[in-house]
């Protein structure tokens, strides 16, 4: 199993390109199930989760053609060659197996996103209950509740969700849906299902994340009738069929924020291209509170860090508030900041597992329920640590870049699920990082 070896103490400096967003790409791949015509997605990141989703779709009968660009000269990523991001064309005209087996779903919760499109297109689906990061309960009850309101019979047996449309000609019907909690995948699943439903569907308390908007834009390009994406009320007028389209996946705002945090923690100065500040208001505000100078360009960001950041307190909440997917990275930043920060996690109940590993590096962190108190220390010391989930892995990388000596991060397969060419991009920024077996 691969590990990541980091020799810390070097401020990050230079320029790298940000890849396409994993959390946008996964539902967009599932949108291909809604049409018999090809859907082409560009700026697709090369990640393990993307490979898993493509394998899942292929075993359903979807034909996948994929092209990837090359890594830049010397094995480093550059602004002109953003890693191995590429293009995939998906043709679901031969869709004949509306089943998502456990073997392909167990490592990735986003696999549940095939449920809505399959029921809408085929009238029936069997999808294994999903896995993914061990950061707490992430139930699919809102997905089931919504599909049931749209006229599907849904049962959960032997670890599988079995949904069957009972409307005329096996078609879902429009309905007014209210989710008990803000759920990104739930909103995406129900929005896709509603595109082919009979009548109008209204999703209230909908997620407002940019990834939801990106999906809606692609569906509209495919012929869907959707309004309100980006607000808490989304309206979808069902159509008889969708057609093919070409869509460019939005830049990864969490990858962008992660590199910004890494530069801030190491006292560096970096420029990130192929990205946008428009999705990152809450993160940028906190980095500026930490003492960073940030310049915003069209499709680029530059950050210049102070010698030592100031501690910043955060509270995670649904978009447009501070994202839970950036909590761990800011905890790592706060471990070497001046002062004490209070971090409140309100989305997932088990998302402080990285704190124990950061303490192994010398961090001063105290946990009380869903609140962490982080007092900055002058230095961290390298040690062997273990990644527990995707964003926790990123926090350990940031801490390793700051720590004196060598830090060895185990179980980095989590990183490969969500960060394209991480070590190459860090090396391009001057970090001393290498993958070891």
Image (cartoon, rainbow, N blue to C red):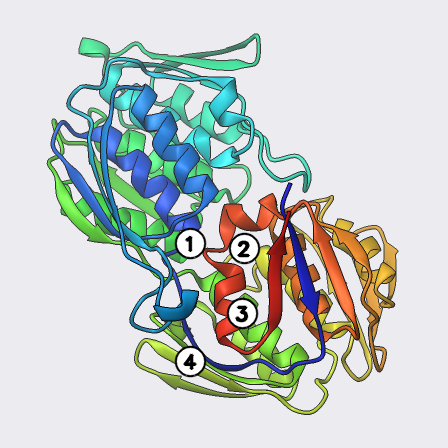
Residue position for label 2: 318
Find numbered disc 2 in the image and state the secondary structure of the residue it sits on.
loop
Image spot of residue 118 (x, y percent): 31, 22
Image spot of residue 241 (x, y percent): 12, 29
Question: Is 150 above or below relative to 215?
Answer: above
Q: Is residue 141 left or right of residue 176?
A: right
Residue position for label 4: 301
Q: Categorize mark 2 by other alpha carbons within 10 Å: few (<14), some (14-19), many (20+).
A: some
Q: Which of the marked residues, 2 or 1, is nearer the chain's N terminus?
A: 1
Residue position for label 3: 426
Q: Which of the marked residues, 3 or 1, is nearer the chain's N terminus?
A: 1
Contact between marks 3 and 1 (CB within 8 A): the answer is no
Find numbered disc 3 in the image and state the secondary structure of the residue it sits on.
helix
Contact between marks 2 and 1 (CB within 8 A): the answer is yes
Question: Is 104 above or below relative to 392?
Answer: above
Find numbered disc 4 in the image and state the secondary structure of the residue it sits on.
strand
What residue is rendered at 52% in x and 34% in y?
A: 109
Give the spatial CA distance, label 4 vs label 3: 16 Å
Give the spatial CA distance, label 2 vs label 1: 8 Å
Give the spatial CA distance, label 2 vs label 3: 29 Å
Which quadrant of the view contains residue 34? Answer: top left
Image spot of residue 365 (x, y percent): 86, 64
Image spot of residue 215 (x, y percent): 30, 47
């Amino acid at each position: 199993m691969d590990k990541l070896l980091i020799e810390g103490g070097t401020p990050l400096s230079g320029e790298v390109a940000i890849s396409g967003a994993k959390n946008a790409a996964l539902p967009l791949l599932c949108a291909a199930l809604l049409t018999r015509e090809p859907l082409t997605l560009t700026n697709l990141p090369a990640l393990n989760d993307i490979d898993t989703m493509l394998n899942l779709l292929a075993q359903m009968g979807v034909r996948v053609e994929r092209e990837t660009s090359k890594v830049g000269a010397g094995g480093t990523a550059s602004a002109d060659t953003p890693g191995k991001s590429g293009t995939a064309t998906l043709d679901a005209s031969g869709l004949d197996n509306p089943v998502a087996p456990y073997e392909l779903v167990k490592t990735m919760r986003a696999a549940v996103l095939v449920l809505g499109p399959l029921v809408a297109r085929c009238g029936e689906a069997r999808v294994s209950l999903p896995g993914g990061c061990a950061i707490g309960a992430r139930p699919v009850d809102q997905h089931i509740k919504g599909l049931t309101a749209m006229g599907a019979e849904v049962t959960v047996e032997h670890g599988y969700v079995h949904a069957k449309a009972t409307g005329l000609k096996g078609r879902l019907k429009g309905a007014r849906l209210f989710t008990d909690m803000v759920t990104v995948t739930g909103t995406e699943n129900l929005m896709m299902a509603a595109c082919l439903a009979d009548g109008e569907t209204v999703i209230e308390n909908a997620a407002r994340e940019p990834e939801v908007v990106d999906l809606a834009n692609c569906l509209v390009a495919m012929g869907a009738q959707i309004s309100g994406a980006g607000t808490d009320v989304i309206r979808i007028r069902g159509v008889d069929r969708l057609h093919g389209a070409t869509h460019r996946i939005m830049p990864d705002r969490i990858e962008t924020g992660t590199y910004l945090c890494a530069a801030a923690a190491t006292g560096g100065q970096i420029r990130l291209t192929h990205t946008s500040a428009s999705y990152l208001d809450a993160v940028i505000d906190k980095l500026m509170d930490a003492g960073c100078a940030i310049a915003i360009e069209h499709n680029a960001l530059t950050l210049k860090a102070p010698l030592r950041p100031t501690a910043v307190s955060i509270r995670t909440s649904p978009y447009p508030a501070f994202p839970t997917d950036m909590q761990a990275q800011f905890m790592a930043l706060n471990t070497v900041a001046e002062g004490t920060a209070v971090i409140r996690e309100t989305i997932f109940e088990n998302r402080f597992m990285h704190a124990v590993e950061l303490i192994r590096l010398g961090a001063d962190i105290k946990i009380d329920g869903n609140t962490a108190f982080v007092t900055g220390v002058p230095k961290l010391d390298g040690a062997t640590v273990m990644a527990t989930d995707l964003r926790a892995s990123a926090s350990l990388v940031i801490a390793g870049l700051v720590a004196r000596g060598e830090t060895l991060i185990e179980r980095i397969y989590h990183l490969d699920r969500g960060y394209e060419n991480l070590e190459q991009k860090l090396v391009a920024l001057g970090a001393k990082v290498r993958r070891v077996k």
